[in-house]
Image (cartoon, helix red, strand yellow):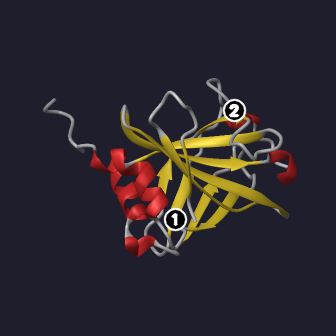
């Protein structure tokens, strides 16, 4: 199930969240997948929420504007070809029920990929995210999710991004 929230009362932006698992080496912890869309910005944003302390991973190379690493974050949906995305990360407190501080890795999500996830065909499909290690010879951080069987929440949250014209060159 997708949980739909309006994070800021003064903004029409919505988020759709679901939960899965993350792994780094032999360590495993819960993970959150959040898709956000704002009518003011037609590009959706994917955020992977993790607890680095539970995973034993040094996430600092991905942190902030001066980050020395930006992925790629490889996203594989079902049996489709994997797509790589650049990421950036920040420490944050997220959501009403979040206890403690988490690390949020974010990437822009192109309209065609977003439309694929919101389609009825994607319901129940496996979604795997794999973050390339910041240092050569390091292990990847992985997260796995099952796209919820009911995609109404995701569709509601991302509709402005799906409705946005793909070609803004004529405006």
- The residue that disc 2 covers is 63
Q: Secondary structure at mark 1?
A: strand
Q: Quadrant of the C terminus?
A: top left
Could you say where residue 92 lies in the image, as x and y percent from the top left? 72, 34
Q: Quadrant of the N terminus?
A: bottom right
Category of crowding for the residue at label 1, using alpha-carbon neighbours closer than 10 angstroms: few (below 14), some (14–19), many (at least 20): some
Q: Is residue 116 above or below residue 86?
A: below
Residues under numbered marks 1 and 2 in contact, where contact means CB atoms less than 8 Å apart = no
- The residue that disc 1 covers is 76
Look at 41% across and 62% down and name the residue there.
118
Look at 83% across and 53% down and name the residue there.
55
Look at 75% across and 35% down and name the residue there.
60
Q: Is residue 17 above or below residue 81?
A: above
Q: Nearer the viewer, residue 69 or 3?
A: 3
First of labels 1, 2 by sequence position: 2
Q: Nearer the viewer, residue 146 or 99?
A: 99
Q: Secondary structure at mark 2?
A: loop
Q: Nearer the viewer, residue 45 or 68?
A: 45
């Amino acid at each position: 199930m997708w949980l739909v929230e309006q994070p800021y009362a003064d903004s029409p932006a919505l988020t759709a969240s679901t939960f899965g698992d993350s792994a780094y080496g032999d360590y495993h912890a819960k993970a959150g997948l959040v898709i956000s869309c704002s009518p003011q910005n037609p590009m959706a944003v994917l955020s992977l929420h993790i607890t680095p302390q539970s995973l034993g991973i040094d996430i600092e190379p991905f942190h902030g504007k001066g980050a020395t690493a930006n992925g790629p974050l490889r996203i594989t949906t079902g049996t489709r070809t994997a797509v790589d995305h650049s990421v950036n990360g920040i420490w944050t407190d997220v959501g009403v029920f979040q206890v403690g501080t988490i690390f949020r890795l974010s990437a822009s999500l192109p309209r065609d990929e977003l439309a694929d996830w919101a389609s009825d065909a994607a319901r129940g499909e496996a979604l795997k995210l794999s973050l390339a290690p910041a240092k050569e010879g390091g292990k990847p951080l992985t997260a796995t999710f099952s796209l919820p069987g009911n995609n109404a929440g995701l569709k509601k949250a991302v509709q402005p991004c799906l409705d946005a014209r793909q070609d803004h060159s004529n405006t």
